[in-house]
Image (spheres, helix red, strand yellow):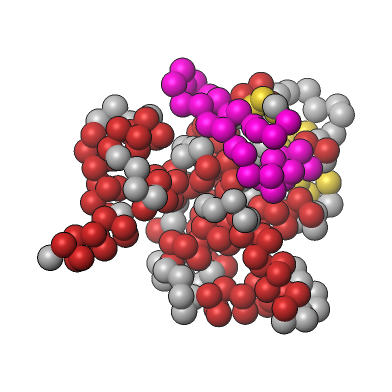
Amino acid sequence: MESNSAYKRFVEWCDRNSVAGKYSENVMLAYFEQNSKIWKSSTLWVHFSMIKAMLNVENNQDIIVAVMGILCASRREELCQMSLNNIEDLGNTLVVNIPDSKTRTFTVITESYIDLYRKYLTLRPAHVNHQRLFIKYTSNKCTIQPVGINLFGKMPTDIARFLKLPNSELYTGHCFRRTSASLLADSGANLCTIKRHGGWKSSSVAEGYLEDSLENKKRIVEAS
């Protein structure tokens, strides 16, 4: 994602259109319906994930973990196991160490995402007796109960259904990780970078993302 957040673009769109009740479902649907003419489905999905994540904190809505999932190419079990000890706040950078991985470390430098992380921490009850990062949000407050692995797996389906994407049930917990790799491939990353990003030992998976890359397909057409 580029440095200007999807959330900021959404707010600016609301301001330009003098939209009242900016965060209602109908407003978001109108925003994505307009952009569906110029964005492909995967792009809509990514932008919705980022916007929804910001809205969750700023408007006391249910917590969506798309930022960590997409930026860090996380599996659902990694999101489930992620703890406060896995993230180091260095001021203008977050260093994220993926649980049970000695090599997969990510840095988050986008200011809006860092602010989102800090705002989320302020909602954490003082009496939580564990270090799990993601805890459930209900009745306008966070509880002490960690988010379970099945809920992480269900989130992409809920997002796809909201966007009215076809076959929404096919959007599984793997979508965060797949979207992350696809975005990296589209940015022009090579095979070694994609393998290291996702922690894949085999080259076949990473090669698949390169072959499916939109930019790669454009280059093939231009060269033919």
Q: Is residue 10 left or right of residue 36?
A: right
Q: Foreground residue, 9 or 74?
A: 9
Q: Residue at x 46, y 26 (%)?
A: 104
Quick check: 14 above or below 109?
Answer: below
Quadrant where the C terminus lies? bottom left
Q: Foreground residue, 136 or 93?
A: 93
Furthest toward the left, the residue is: 224
Quick check: 212 above or below 32?
Answer: above
Picture coordinates of residue 178, whole percent (x, y): 40, 47
Picture coordinates of residue 146, whole percent (x, y): 68, 34
Furthest toward the front, the residue is: 223
Q: Residue at x 63, y 44 (%)?
A: 110
Q: Is residue 146 visible?
A: no
Q: Residue at x 49, y 21 (%)?
A: 100
Picture coordinates of residue 19, whole percent (x, y): 76, 79
Image quadrant where residue 115 sits: top right
Residue 15 among magenta residues: no
Picture coordinates of residue 128, whole percent (x, y): 80, 27
Q: Is residue 105 left or right of residue 26?
A: left
Q: Residue at x 69, y 40 (%)?
A: 114
Q: Which residues are magenta?
A: 91-119
Q: Is residue 137 left or right of residue 81?
A: right
Q: Is residue 219 visible?
A: yes
Q: Is residue 220 left or right of residue 61?
A: left
Quick check: 157 above or below 71?
Answer: below
Quick check: 203 above or below 157?
Answer: above
